[in-house]
Image (tube, rainbow, N blue to C red):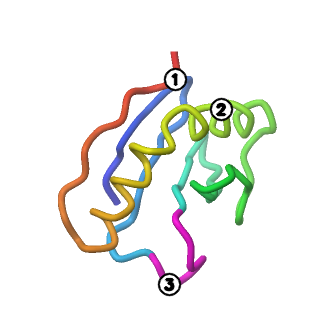
C-alpha cells in the first residue's frame, strides 16, 4: 500500500491491484487510526469513517488532484510504481 501524499495528519494511499472491491477508482485515507475509502471520480466516501473536517479536506484535495490521482490509479491496478502527489496546502 504505497503512500502517495500526506497533509494535515492524513495519509493517502493506493493499493496495488485494488480494482475489484469497490470496482471504481478510489483512494484510502487514514487519520489517527481511522480509515476511509474515497471515490476519485466524485470524492464520495465509499466505506469507512474519518472526522468530517478531514473528509472535507480529502474531498477538496481529490478535486484539485483528480487527473494525477487517475494516472496513479491506472499504475496501481497494473502493479506499477506510483508517483507522489502534492499535498493540500
**Residue at 56% across / 72% down in the picture?**
24
Q: Residue furthest front?
A: 67
Q: Quadrant of residue 52?
A: top right
Q: Which residue, given by chain and number where applicable, does mark 1 sit on?
A: 88
How packed is label 3: few (under 14 Cα within 10 Å), some, or many (20 or more)? few
Q: CA distance from mark 2 to mark 3?
A: 25 Å
Does the magenta stretch mainly form a helix, a strand or a loop?
loop
**Nearest the camera: 73 or 8?**
73
**Image position, residue 1 (x, y; %):** 34, 60
Q: Is residue 89 above or below residue 84?
A: above
Q: Residue furthest top?
A: 89
Q: Which residue, given by chain and number where applicable, does mark 3 sit on?
A: 20
**Image position, residue 3 (x, y; %):** 35, 46
**Residue at 54% across / 28% down in the picture?**
9
Q: How many marks?
A: 3
Residues rendered magenta in the picture: 19-25
Q: Which residue, given by chain and number where applicable, does mark 2 sit on?
A: 60
**Residue at 67% across / 30% down in the picture?**
57
Q: Which mark is residue 35?
A: none
**Image position, residue 67 (x, y; %):** 44, 45
Please indicate whether residue 61 sits to the left or right of residue 75 in the image: right
Amino acid at each position: 500500500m504505497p503512500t502517495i501524499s500526506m497533509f494535515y495528519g492524513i495519509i493517502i494511499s493506493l493499493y496495488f491491484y485494488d480494482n475489484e472491491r469497490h470496482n471504481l477508482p478510489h483512494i484510502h485515507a487514514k487519520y489517527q487510526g481511522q480509515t476511509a475509502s474515497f471515490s476519485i471520480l466524485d470524492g464520495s466516501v465509499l466505506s469507512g469513517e474519518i472526522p468530517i473536517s478531514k473528509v472535507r479536506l480529502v474531498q477538496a484535495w481529490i478535486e484539485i488532484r483528480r487527473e494525477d490521482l487517475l494516472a496513479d490509479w491506472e499504475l496501481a491496478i497494473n502493479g506499477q510504481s506510483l508517483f507522489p502527489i502534492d499535498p493540500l496546502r
